[in-house]
Image (cartoon, rainbow, N blue to C red):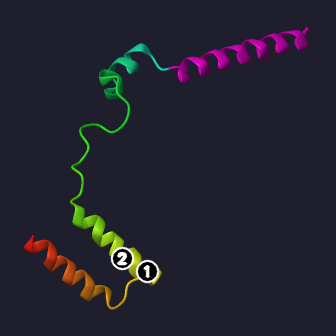
Amino acid sequence: MNRRKLTLIGVALAALVATAGVAAAAPSDNARESSPASEADQRGPPGELPDPVPDFVSDIHDLVSDFLSGALDGSLGDTLSDRANDFSGA
């Protein structure tokens, strides 16, 4: 008889723990309503995207890539300085 009672108590405790675990894991309706992401029903970054960079930024990246690959003759600093002077006069 002790074995039966212990088994019944063990099954009841396991069911109670499983039910409490499921209830704790499931978000409540209040939690869903108060989250900022669900208010907007929007995914991704908030706000607008920044403006595109000016064309000379891409040119500078190309110069650095050319320097790293060995395609640029001369000094990177001198070439960038000359290119910057071209942009400031435009």
Foreground pick, 40 / 19: 40
Above-or-below relation of 36 to 72: above
Left or right of 52: which side holds 69?
A: right
Q: Where is residue 75, by image quadrant? A: bottom left
Q: Where is residue 24, by image quadrant? A: top right
**Magenta segment, which residues?**
1-26
Above-or-below relation of 87 to 24: below
Residue wearing tag 1: 68
Magenta segment: does it hold 29?
no
Magenta segment: does it hold 2?
yes
Q: Quadrant of the C terminus?
A: bottom left
For residue 64, the mark is 2
Question: Residue flagged by tag 1: what amino acid is it?
Answer: Leu
Q: Where is residue 14, by image quadrant? A: top right
Q: Disc 2 on helix, strand or loop?
A: helix
At a point 46% along the width and 80% down the height, the residue shown is 69
Q: Are marks 2 and 1 in contact (CB under 8 Å)?
A: yes
Q: Quadrant of the N terminus?
A: top right
Measured from the top left, where is residue 80 in percent x and y? Answer: 25, 81
Measured from the top left, where is residue 62 in percent x and y? Answer: 35, 71
